[in-house]
Image (tube, helix red, strand yellow):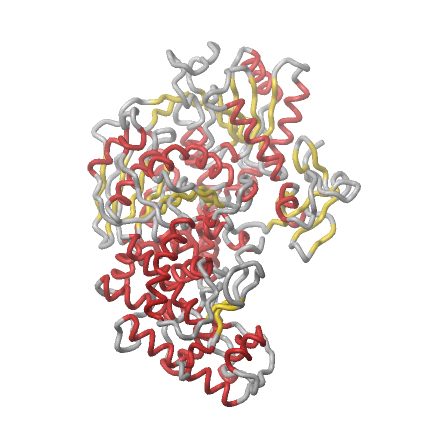
Amino acid sequence: MDISSYYKYWGKAKREPLQNGADYHLLVYHCLDVAAVVDIWLDESKVILKQIAQQINFSQSEAKAIVLFYVLLHDLGKFDARFQNFVEEVRIELQGCEYEVEPEKYAHGSHGYLHFIQQYGHNEAMKAVAGHHGFCDISIDRNLIDPDADEELVELDKQARQEWIDFCLLFTGLTVIPEVGDIPMLAGLCSVADWIGSSITNFTKDQTLDLQDYYQKALPRAKDALLESGMLNKINGSGFGFLFKPYQPRGIQTLLPKLPLETGLTIVESDTGSGKTEFALAYASMLIEQNLADGIVFGLPTQATANGLFKRIGEAAFKLFPDSTPTLAHGKSKYLFSDENGFLHQSNKRAFLGSMSVATVDQILMGVLSIKHQFIRSFGTRKSVLILDEIHSFDAYMYALIDKVIKGQHQAFSNVILLSATLSLSLKNKLLKPYAGTARSNEYPLVTHVDLEGNTQEYSLESSGKKKHITIENWFSEDLLPSSEQQITLLEHAKSGAVIGIICNTVADAQGLYVQLKRLVAEGEIEVDLFHARYTYADRARIEDEVLQTYGKDAPRKGRILVATQVVEQSLDLDFDIIVSQIAPIEFLMQRMGRLWRHNRINTSLHTRCNRIKQPTFITLLPSQKISNWSSHYQGSGFVYRSIRVLFRTELYLQQTDTLTFPDCYRQAIEYVHAEQPYPNEALELTNLYDKYQIEQDGSAYTAKMYSVLDSKPLTDVDPRCALLTREGEMTATVVLIDELGGLLHGGDYKEQQDRERSTVAIAKKHAKGKEDSDFHCIKAVVNKDIEYGKLGIVLPNLKK
């Protein structure tokens, strides 16, 4: 029987002997399976196809044909003797035994692209689909494009590839190879469709089937698979009333009816505890209902803040998408769920593909770095409303990557919502720039919206509502820690029932202060707790939960002191009567102030406050010594925050007032501290330090941009070194803690990543002692031999005894 040459190639070989069907699946059928998934997805989504049509400036029907054409070619490289010979007996069955093939390493995606451009020239869309297994390697030697095989077999490969390209043109109704340039969402769409299309493989080797008939039968199987994977979810309603009834909108939430229902970038500036998260959820749901997005992706600065938000949004997620399961994505998220069977839960890169996801920002930044399957993450954010919380809290390196992410959202005709209580005007304009927006208003609270054409609209409240007055005190000390007398004062407050938080900028300071306070407290008198990031994952998760139970909204108000680092600064719902903090830039101090008197405890069901503290009180620890050396004046806090001028201006601002009125003070305070020009009579050395700091920041941004355009062979997305590319600073080492008998500190199998990471800490390389394990990219450290670890967490040598 005379059949088309493309029927003589297999695409999937059976790996499970108990699976039904033949021993292999013909390549053409696999390509049609994947195309069927895309076909259904583009029909059901109402968003992705519209975005792609806008991206390439074609009608939706034309755009769909173009996408299907390239998706059908994603495995073009499998029409090659080298791939076919991976299962030699199947190749012989299909092509005969008279040909010989020399075995060699072969990447069918990258070679498929080379085969294509050999005849048709460079093509970004073809490169996108050819890289569906992680990336497309274009550095392969063109002289090695053909296999080392009999000439007849090489010619058969060429004929099959050409016949398949011709069929795909005919199948999609195209007459020529479409030249459309880059399609930002194509790589991700194709890769995910390939995963799902492979799940519906029915192992068919019948070479007589009509391909159109096969395709029609594949479509319902594709739809079932998409539904089962969690990719197709209809929104059940939208808006604040739908999500949060019976609560009435307050503050910035009352602006929701005024906002335009069109794609763009939205920046929300409002004080801590004012409901920015609820605003963002409500607005995102309104955009989704207008078919302007397909889901919601939240990005948070830390694992603790991501965990906290994930718990908060559960009910809202169920209301919006009752048929879907929200996902959590960060370095340890897979250890919070025992069930990883769901398609979206099998890896962090898949987590963004559903209807609702919460992630740490590093997972989102991986979408613009040289990491395998980075386009899966960017596809997930670009089809969704991307919400980045605490947007003020990153450094220049990360802002350069965030800028790349926002530019990608704009290029893909996608939505972004940025949330912050404390945003300087200069940073705000940088964030607006990718959408060509410009900030004008100095009002606060404020919502700024920029559409895809750069039209900027700003929305402010007629009245900012209820004011919050915080009493400001400044304590001076030599080491930026409370003196013995000041510690006794705090203990007396706690003995009278006050709930006190003390926030240090370094772990060493937190550990040292904790030890000092414990020495002053008689057994059973009051509790003093410690919380920072230098614990193993298992211990940190446990301590975080204990802190929320003890200092959170519903906790009993019992006199107690928490000594902590910046881990309590953002998104954790903690409520203190007094906060003592080491000096930090004003925006970070204001974030900490957001944990003061956070909830109304008068005539409510919540536990009441003690009578000793009459108003929210924030105490800042300032250096007592005269300035002799600006670089070291703020000690460890200067090393952490680096901009000495910002710390000095923050100190000046705090010494000018005894009360801060929120939200009125936000704009004035932040602009006072972050004004770009030197103050009159500002010390020359301080100005020079600031100029040096700015040069360092520019260098950091440049480094990040270089990483984002790196065209070398990328890391796999599960490589623990990937996270290092998303953050700058002193490179940390992954240290796995081992007991004296050689077992993991928290038990389990060392070879299992999940068990290993429960006993893992990240510390500066210079402090990492132990035996290097190159197989798992970590250092094995014996507790109390290589590293001191206990109730205080990791104790480094420089901690004063």
Pick the quarter of the image with the C terminus: top right
Which one is in front, 205 or 503? 205
Question: Where is residue 742 drawn, in percent x and y?
Answer: 77, 44
Query: Is 80 drawn above or below residue 542 in the view shown?
Result: below
The reply to whether residue 367 is visible in this rendering is: yes
Which one is in front, 698 or 345? 345
The reply to whether residue 683 is visible in this rendering is: no
Q: Residue at x 43, y 62 (%)?
A: 194
Residue 251 location, quadrant: top left
Question: Where is residue 129 drawn, in percent x and y?
Answer: 41, 67
Query: Is 114 drawn above or below residue 51 in the view shown?
Result: below
Query: Is 630 drawn above or below residue 462 in the view shown?
Result: below
Q: How many marks?
A: 0
Question: Where is residue 128 drawn, in percent x and y?
Answer: 40, 67
Q: Residue at x 26, y 72 (%)?
A: 173
Which one is in front, 250 or 391? 250
> 787 left or right of 198?
right
Query: Is 110 drawn above or below residue 319 in the view shown?
Result: below
Pick the quarter of the image with the N terminus: bottom left
Q: Residue at x 58, y 25 (%)?
A: 482
Which one is in front, 769 or 452? 452
- Residue most extreme to the right: 741
Question: Where is residue 369 drawn, in percent x and y?
Answer: 47, 58
